[in-house]
Image (spheres, grey):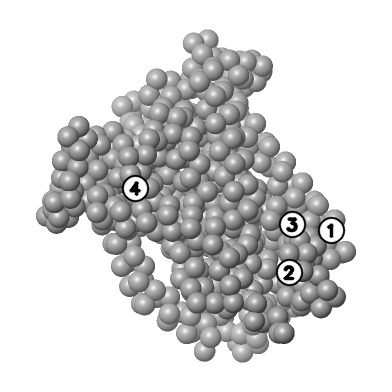
Amino acid sequence: MSPRRRTGLVPYLLSLPAAVWLGAFFVLPLLTILGVSLMTGNSIDGWTLTWNFSIFGDAISTYSTQFGRSFLYGGISTAVALVTMYPVAYWIAFHGGRFKSVLLFLLLLPFFVSFVIRILAWQFILADDGIILSALKDIGLVPADTHVLSTPFAVVAGLTYDALPFMLLPLYVALQRIDPAHVEAAADLYATGAARFRTVILPLSAPGIYAGIVLVAITNIGDYLSASILGGPSTTMIGNIIQTQYVNNADYPIASALALILMVTLMLAMAVYARVFGTRTLQEHIG
Amino acid sequence: MSAASAPVGRRRSRGLAGPLWQRAVLPSYVFVVLAVTLVPIIVMIVYSLNQAPNQRLSFSWHGFTTEWYRRLFEIPDLTSALVTSLEIAALSTVIAVAIGTPAALALTRYRFRGRGVGDLVILADIAAPSVVVGASLLGLFVYLGVSRGFGTILIAHVAFNVAFVVIVLQARLRDIDPSLAEAARDLGSSPFQAFWLVTVPVIYPAILSAALLAAALSIDDFIITSFVAGQTLTFPLWVYGSVKVGIPPQVFAMGTLIFAAGVLIALAGVVSARRSEPRT
């Protein structure tokens, strides 16, 4: 009897517990919020499914500012993190020498500090009477009423800081895979430094850029902690609204609708992004 | 690597900008980024050693003290929040590894209908924004009338940890020759024995790193937990709640200790991996 005959059920049995868990507590909830968003009522009298599709229009028109802001802050912080970390990843991958692992480890240290405490530390640093501003005010470099907290700058700075290690990792992985012989070959063919970068290193590192952008953008667009601790009333992001409506106000339909819209918008953005940027660089990568 | 490419660069007129760029400008830049990276960590450590006359963290420096480490567990609510976090981390890690390991094995070793969907769900679970994952889970719990607390936090943490365990193990399993386990089968062992005696020892380091990642993600999670926690507080939730009323210095002391523990475990992992390298 061939052993192949008995493998029929094995993979299903092996993956059953995980499939059940993820099905019940990840996939099913995503379907549930569609139902929840179409209900009307309140937490005292209970909720009934009324197929209230107009909630999506209401949600978008009421919170379009916060949606726009989330994508703006998320986009800026992703772009800044990419531009900041690319040269770092490049230098470590090509010229890090024996300090490679040490440098990487040091740059990844924020992973070991609790997310909330990292943001709190920035609140501490950027506060009106905090370390930076009090010093600058003492020597008269900035006016005494300058403040950074509650401004978009503080929120974007927090988001960017959080993104740095997440951006570094995929960039470094992609860059250190590049065979130096390819760069040398370009040099042998009289490519200038800039040309070598543009035609060899940049295209070969495109998968890392792609992965870093996806990873960081999704996290930052959906974040609410940075806006909550470093921001103010004028920097509210869509994550803050979802959280407040769901947990504090118990307005489940509007919060579910907002979460659903966020998820669908991100999925569409990713699909377009993969079409325009991802597959083309992938083709260049292979061809 | 750089040594090999250096002669080429010199011969082919890399220009004066090349070496200066690589030897001075870029390294200095890397160190500036590194400094910014470390600033919040240094702030946390330094201010955990600052005296605080009113029991709250303040910006001004009152003098060095180790008081907050000695009085680490003096705030009962904070201590119980930390204990909750550690319990959730331990339990969710064990469950995620227990159900994630066989799933990773199935997804890498077998071709079966539904494998593509499985891979997609795992990826979606990792990529989906935490706000959406948290909000939709709360939606389900509200819908079913489940009261929120320790159990729902645990359910949520397992749900995101499973995906990371599967991803880490898949990467390792792809590098391992499946004929190892097949050889054991040929020598008369049962599939269970082959798994337990051959596959597990080989992927043990990967299981360990998956478990550490899961535990770290669980202790750190704020956004998803904030949706499903109900009245139960984990360490990040307690810290967040204390922002409005003033943060006790013990928070930075605990943060520093968690940081130190994480760094030590990671370093131990690196050292043991280096030591076992020649043998495998």
- Among the two numbered marks 2 and 3 on one chain, the one whose residue lies closer to the N terminus: 2
What residue sits 66% from the left and 41% below the top? B262
Q: Of circles 4 and 1, which is in front? A: 4
Mark 3 — residue? B205
For the image, the number of numbered tags is: 4
Chain assignment, label 2: B
Mark 4 — residue? B140
Q: Marks 3 and 1: same chain?
A: yes
Chain assignment, label 4: B
Q: Marks 2 and 4: same chain?
A: yes
User: Element type at marker 2?
Assistant: helix
Q: Of circles 4 and 3, which is in front? A: 4
- Which residue type carries mark 2? Pro
- Among the two numbered marks 4 and 3 on one chain, the one whose residue lies closer to the N terminus: 4
Disc 2 to disc 3, C-alpha distance: 21 Å
Position of B85 with respect to A96 (left or right) is: left
Q: Nearer the viewer, residue B233 or A100?
A: B233
- Which residue type carries mark 3? Pro
Q: Nearer the viewer, residue B165 or A94?
A: B165
Chain assignment, label 3: B
Q: Marks 4 and 3: same chain?
A: yes
User: Can residue A234 be seen?
Assistant: no
Disc 4 to disc 3, C-alpha distance: 36 Å
